[in-house]
Image (cartoon, rainbow, N blue to C red):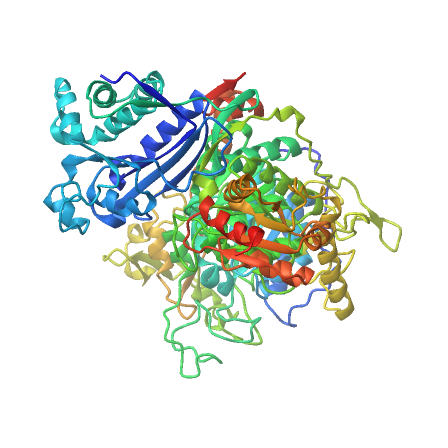
Amino acid sequence: MTDTLIPTTTRKDWTSDQEVRWCPGCGDYSILAAVQMLMPDLGIRRENTVFISGIGCAARFPYYMNTFGMHSIHGRAPAIASGLALARPDLSVWVISGDGDALSIGGNHLIHALRRNVNLNILLFNNQIYGLTKGQYSPTSEAGKVTKSTPFGSLETPFNPMSLALGAEATFVARTHDMDRKHMMEMFRRAHAHHGASFVEVYQNCNVFNDGAFEEILSKDVRSDMLITLEHGKQIRFGADGQFVVVSDGNGGVKIALAQEVEDSEIIVHDEHNPNPALAFALSRLASGPHSPTPIGVFRDVVHPEYGDQMADQIQRALDSKGPGDLNSLLRSAGATWEVH
Amino acid sequence: MVDSVVELDRVIVRFAGDSGDGMQLVGDRFTNLSAAFGNDLATLPDYPAEIRAPAGTLPGVSAFQVHISNHDIVTPGDFPDVLVAMNPAALKANLVHVKPGATLIVNADAFEERNLAKAGYEQNPLEDNSLADYTLYKIPMTTLTIEATKPTGAKPRDAERSKNFFALGIVSWMYSRPFEPTLEWIGKRFSARPELAEINTLAFKAGVNFGETTEIFGHAYEVKPAKLDPGTYINITGNTGLAWGLIAASKLSGLDLFLGSYPITPASDILHELSKHKNFSVKTLQAEDEIAGVGAALGASFGGLLGVTTTSGPGMDLKAETIGLALQLELPLIVIDVQRGGPSTGLPTKSEQSDLLMAMYGRHGESPLPVIAAKTPSDCFFVAIEAARIAIKYRTPVVVLSDGYLANGAEPWKLPDCDLLAEIDPKFSREPNGEHPDGSPAFFPYLRDPETLARPWAPPGTAGLEHRVGGLEKADVTGNVSYDPENHEHMIRVRAAKVAGIANELAPLEVDDPDKAKVLVVGWGSTHGSIVGAIRRVRANGGAVAHVHLTHMFPLPRDLGDILRRYDRVIVPELNTGQLSKVLRAEYSIETIDVNKIQAQPFKVGELEEAFAREVFGA
C-alpha cells in the first residue's frame, strides 16, 4: 500500500519494551539490531508490520519488535504467516526462523510457502545446531558432528538451505551473515522489496553450543578470501586483490579459478534475474559448508505472480461477473428449489 | 400395460452397484425428483473408500438409500422396500439390508459366471430359488440399454455405461415420478457432450417404457407429497449446510471468510463448496497438510478475518497443537471435524461419533474449548453460525462436530429468511485500553471484558495497538511472557471460566416429554433422526419416553443436570463406546444406560426402538 504520510521513525520506535534474553554474545543480537535499524527506512508503518516466528532461540525475535507479532509453534510460522499475508495483503509480514524450525520440523511449510510465492520475508537464522534444547545436531549440522544426541558423530547429510530454496521454486534467495550489519540490512531491504516469498539465510553464531561454526569463512583475516560477494551484473570475483574468480566447471557446475589463468570472458557474470535457476543452484553448490569460499548476496530475484494477488484477482473477477454475494440468493440459486403452498 | 396405481405412505429404495456404475448419481437424481415432487425424504449414501475397487467385487459395491414419504420422516429408513442391484456383488453385499418380501430389481445380464464368482456365488441366486422370499424382477438391463441406444451409433461398450439411467427410468416409473426434470437435468449435465446426453436420455426413456409396457410389474405406486410447512425448499446435505452457514457467519459478522484446509474424506466437499463462492470474498487455501490448513486459518484470524479449518478425525490429530495455540492466543477459530470411523485411517467413508472426547480433551495442558454438534444436515447451517458467534464473542477456537452421515445425507430444508439472522459484532479494539505508568496510552491485549472474560481482538493495522502474542504463558492483562506460578494458575482458571461462562447464555434445553415419562433419552449429533423415529414408535405403542438432544457439548447447558435428575432412567444412544455417557456420569454423578453401535453405520430405528422399549415397558 502506498502511503505518503508515513511518520518518520527511529530504531527506538521499532524496539519493544521487553528485555532481550538471548545468551550474551549470541549472533541474534546483531541480526535484531540490523532489522530494527532497517525498519525506519522501509517506508512502512509499525502497525502494518508483523513478525511471526516458530520455536527456538530465534523465535523470541517478535517479542523484541514494537510491531504486531506472534511467537507460534514449532515449524509452523510459514503456514500461519501465509494465512495472515493472504488475509491481509496490506501488511508487511516477516517470518523469523532457525535451522531446526524451518528445515526440520517445518520443512514442509517452508518449501510450500516458497513455491506458492506468498508475499513473505522469511529469515532463517542458521547456526547449525539446536540451541534452545541445548545442543543437539540440526539439519544443517555437518556430517560427523559430535553432539549430545550423536556422541559418535552425526550420520546425516546436511541441507544446503540455498539449494533447498532454489529447488523449491523460490523467487528470491539470498545469504548473509551476522558479522556484517550493512550486508544484512541490504539483504533484508532487498527481501522486503521483492514482491513474493523472499528467503534469506543468515549465518549466525551460537557461541554456547556451536561457537565458531563459521570462523573459517567469517573471521576478519580470512573473509576476503573466503566470502564471494555476489553482485548483479558483475563478474564473480573475490580475494583481497580480486585474484579469484568463478567459472564453469564444464560439468554443469561452477568452480573457483585464478583470474590470471582464465580468459576474462570465461568469468561468470552474476545474473539475479535469470529465469533459469540452474546457475544460481550451481553457485549454491560451490561450497558444501562454511569451510571453503562461500557465496553471499542475492542468488536469485525473479518476478513471478504473487499468490495473494492472484487470489485477489479471482475474487475480483467473481465480483465483476456475479456482483457481491447475497445470502438469500445463494440459498435459492445453488440447487433445485421447490415451493410448498 | 399396467393400469392401476397403488398409493403408499412411504417407500425406501436402495440403489446398489459397482463403484463405477453411477449409483450415487442416480440415487441423487431420484432424491431430487422426489424432493421437487414434494415428498419428505432422507438419504444415506454408502460407498467404499476405494475410488474404483476391482469391478464386480464386494469391496467395490456402492449404494445409495433414499426414503421418501407423504409425511414427516426422520431417517433414511431401516430396511429398503426395493433394492436395485446392478450385479451379483451388489446383491450379495446389500441383501443383508433387505427383509423378505421386499422387491429386488436386478440387472440379469450381470449375473454371468465371472461376476458370480467374483461375488463368491457358487450358483446363480437368480436361478436357484434362494430368493424365493422376495419379489424378484430379473431384467436384462445391459442388453436393453445397448438396444435402446443403437440409433445413436454408440459402441456397446459406451452405451452399456448408461444402464444406471435405465434403472432410474424403471424406478421413476414404478413410483410415478415426473420424467421431465430428469430429461432436463441430463440435457444440462451433458450439454458439452451431446452424444452422451442422447445416450443417457434414450436409456432413461427405455427404462420408463420398460416399466410401463411390460407386464412384469403388477402396478405402479405413488407416494403423495408430504404436508410440509409452506415455503421454499431445497435439498441440503450437511457439508453444504456447513459451507453456507460459514458464508452466512461471514456476512453476519462483516468478517471475510478464510478457509485453510487439506482434502480429507468426508469433509472435502466443504472446501469444494466454499471455493466456488468467491463473490462472497471467501478466501480458500488448499494447504500442504492439515497442520498448515489450521495454521493459515489461525494466521487469518490474527489478521481479523473469520478463520476456519475443516477436516475429519486424522486431521484433528494433526491440528491439535495449533488449536492449543489458538486457545492460548485467545483468537476466534472454527475447527470443523466431520467424524468418520476411527481409529487411525479407520473407515474413511463411513460415519461414527467417536471424536467427542478428542474434541473436548484432545490437547495437552489444561485446554478447554467449546464444542458444538450438528444434529441434521440442515442444522449444520445454524451450527456453523453458532460456532462463529461463540468463537468471535469469546475469542476462542470452537470445534464443530458433524459426521459422514450428516455430511453426505440429504433432507428437504425450508429455507430461512437470512435477513432475520442475528448479526455478530466482532468488537475489534480501535484504541488503547489503558495507561502506562507514565500516563501515556497503552494497549493491554489480555485485559478482559468483565462479563464474558473475552480479551480484546486487535488485528494489525491500528496504530498504538501493536502487541505480541504467543504460545508461552501470558501475563494477565499485559500479555507479556510470564513464568510466574500464581499467574499461570490464574490464567488457567480464567481461560476455563471464560469457556464455562458460555453456558450462561444458552437457551433452556427443549425436552420433548408429552407424557410425563420416567425414561429420558439423551442424544447428540446425527443420531437425532433415529432417536426421534424410535421414540415415535414407542409412543405409538403406548410407551412414555422423553427426549433431549444436545447441540452444546462443551460447556454443557446449565439446566441439563436438573433435567437428568428428573428421570428414573437415562438412556444415552451413541455411535461410539459411550463417550457422552462417560461425560454425563462424571459431570452429574448419575447412572446412564448406554446404547452403543460401532459399525460405522447409523442406528436403525428398530434397534433403538427395541432398546427404548426395554426400559419403558420392562424386559
Q: Is residue A289 left or right of residue B420?
A: left
The spot of residue A173 in percent (x, y) is 45, 51
The spot of residue A76 in percent (x, y) is 52, 56
| Residue farthest along the left direction in this orientation | B113
The spot of residue A127 in percent (x, y) is 51, 68
In the image, is residue A140 above or below residue A191? Answer: below
In the image, is residue B121 above or below residue B486? Answer: above
Seen at 59% across and 53% down, the residue is A52
In the image, is residue B217 above or below residue B126? Answer: above
Q: Where is residue B328, by image quadrant? A: bottom right
Q: Quadrant of the N terminus of chain A?
A: top right
Number of labelled discs? 0
Q: Where is residue B494, by image quadrant? A: bottom right
Q: Nearer the viewer, residue B72 or A168?
A: B72
Seen at 51% across and 46% down, the residue is B527
Q: Is residue B98 left or right of residue B196?
A: right
Seen at 51% across and 74% down, the residue is A212
Q: Nearer the viewer, residue B104 or A102?
A: B104
Q: Nearer the viewer, residue A34 or B539?
A: B539
Q: Nearer the viewer, residue B296 or A77?
A: B296
The spot of residue B83 in percent (x, y) is 30, 37
**Could one spot residue B297 in this view of the protein?**
yes
| Residue farthest along the bottom direction in this orientation | A152
Q: Is residue B280 left or right of residue A143?
A: right
Q: Is residue B517 left or right of residue A277?
A: right
**Could one spot residue B198 in this view of the protein?**
no
Q: Quadrant of the C terminus of chain A?
A: top right
